[in-house]
Image: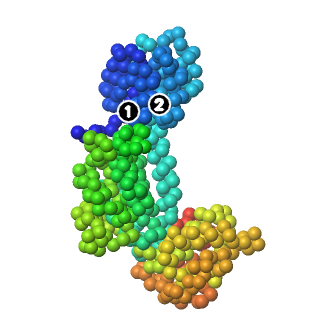
Amino acid sequence: MTVQADLRFLIVDDHHSIRKLCATVGSSLGFACKEAESAEAALATLEGDSPDIVLADLMMPRMSGLEFLPRVKQLVPRCEIAIMTGHGSIETAVQAMKLGAYDYITKPFRVEELKLLLQRMEEKVKLVAENQFLRERVSAEMDLNGIVGSSAKIQDVLRMVARLKDTHTPVLISGESGTGKELVARAIHYRGSFAKRPFVAVDCGSLVPTLIESELFGYEKGAFTGALKSKEGLFQSAHGGTIFLDEIGELSMEMQAKLLRVLQEKEVRPVGSNQKVKVDVRVIAATNRDLETAYKEGTFRKDLYFRLNVVTLHLPPLRERKLDIPPLVHYFLDKFAPGKMISISAAATRCMMQYAWPGNVRELENCIERAVALGSHETSDVIDVNDLPAAVRMGMGNDLSPATEIFEEEAVPVPVSPLAPDTDLEELERLTIQRVFQQVHGDKTLAGKMLGISRATLYRKL
C-alpha cells in the first residue's frame, strides 16, 4: 500500500453527525481527514500525526475548546485552528481568537460557509509554507554569492549548474573537503524551477549508524525504545524537492542497499511500519572519495554508483584556481568586516598566494575571519602576515610561485607583465578585473557577478 500525503484536517467534536459533516466537506476539498470525539483524544493523535488544520467545538466535556487551543498551539505551532460555537458564545469565540484561533463559525452552519472557512485556512497554511521556502531561498541565495571566481575551472562549474538547475537528473558532486560541494548543490536547487520546494541536506558521515535508517526513512511510534511518537524521515521532508546526500561514501553497505531500493522504487518504508510512503525527490550526492575506485575495491555498491553517477560535477581545489584567491579574499572581507576599508599587505598577499590551501575555500574563509577578528585594526586597517594563521605563514614556499600559477589556467589572454615579488593585492585585483572585463567584453553587470562583488563596489574599484 502506498500513502500519498495531503493537507491534514482534524475535526474535534463530541457529536458524531457534526464530525461526519465536516469530514465530508474536508474530503471534497482534497484534505486527509481525521476525527476525534474529545479534546483528550485529539491531543493523543497529535503525538503521532501533526495536522495542518484543526476545527474544534468550543463546548466539549472535560476539556473545553479554550483549554484545548493553547495545548495544540504548543504541540503544533504552525497548525491553524478554527472554533465551532453556538450563538450564545460569540464573546468566548472572540477570546479564542485572541489566544491564537484563526476564526470561528457558529452552529448551525451551512456547508458553503464551512467550505469557505476551510479554503481560507488552507490558503493561510500554504502561504506560511511558501514564506518559509522563500526565506530559505533568500538565505541560500545569499550563500550562493560564495561561488566566487573568474577562473576557467569555476566558470565550467557554473555553466554546468545552469544546465542542471531545472532537471530531475541525479547529480554526483566530487571534490576535496572545503571546495564548496553543498554550495553548488544549493545553487542547482535554488537557481531553477525547484527553488520553492524543499531542500534537505544530509551529512551521511555524521549520522549515528544505528539510527541512520530512522533518520532517512522515518519511524512509527513504538518502533524502538524512545520512539514516543511517529516521525517523518528526511526523504519525506524533501518530497517534491531535492535531497542532498553529503559524503555518501561513508554509508555502510547495508544502508547503500536500502538507499538503492528507495531510488529505484521511489518510496520509503518507515521503521516499524508495514506501509510504504511515496516520495518524489531529486537526489544530489557528494563525496570527497573516489567512488569508482571504491566500487572496484568492493567498498561501495556498483549498482548504486551508476544510479547516482548520471551526471558528475567535479569541483577543483583552490590550489588549481589561484586566480580566484583575490576576489575570494575581497568577498570574505566584505562578509566579515562590512563597511570597513580593510586591505591586505603585500607580504600577506604573497603568503596567501604561495600557500597550498589543503583545506581549500573553507580554509581561506577561516583565515580571513581569523585575521579580521584578531588583527589590531584599531591602529591599522591592513592585514599583515602576523594576522594570518601559523600554518599559512609557515607554508610560504611550499607551493609553486604565484607568478607561474595565477594565470596558468585557460582563459581569454590578457597582456600581463610578470608579477614582481612585492606585488600587492590591489595590483592582483587590477589584473584580475582587467582579465574578467576582456572575457565578458566590458559587461559590468556580468563582470561583477563573476568577481563576486556588487556593481557599486566594481565601479569604486574601476
Number of marks in picture: 2
Disc ID at residue 8: 1
For label 2, the SS is strand
- Residue that carries the numbered disc 2 in the rendered image: 80
Q: Who's the residue at 38% across and 32% down the image?
A: 8
Whether residue 111 is situated above or below residue 335 in the rendered picture: above
For label 1, the SS is strand
Q: Quadrant of residue 273?
A: top left
Q: Quadrant of the N terminus?
A: top left
Q: Position of residue 249 (x, y in %)?
A: 35, 65
Image position of 298 (left or right of 244): left
Q: Position of residue 438 (x, y in %)?
A: 47, 76
Q: Let me know if residue 235 appears in the view.
A: no
User: Please, what is the three-letter code of the amino acid marked with disc 1?
Assistant: Arg
Q: Who's the residue at 27% across and 40% down the image?
A: 275
Q: Quadrant of residue 335?
A: bottom right
The one nearer the camera, 314 or 270, is 270
The one nearer the camera, 458 or 3, is 3
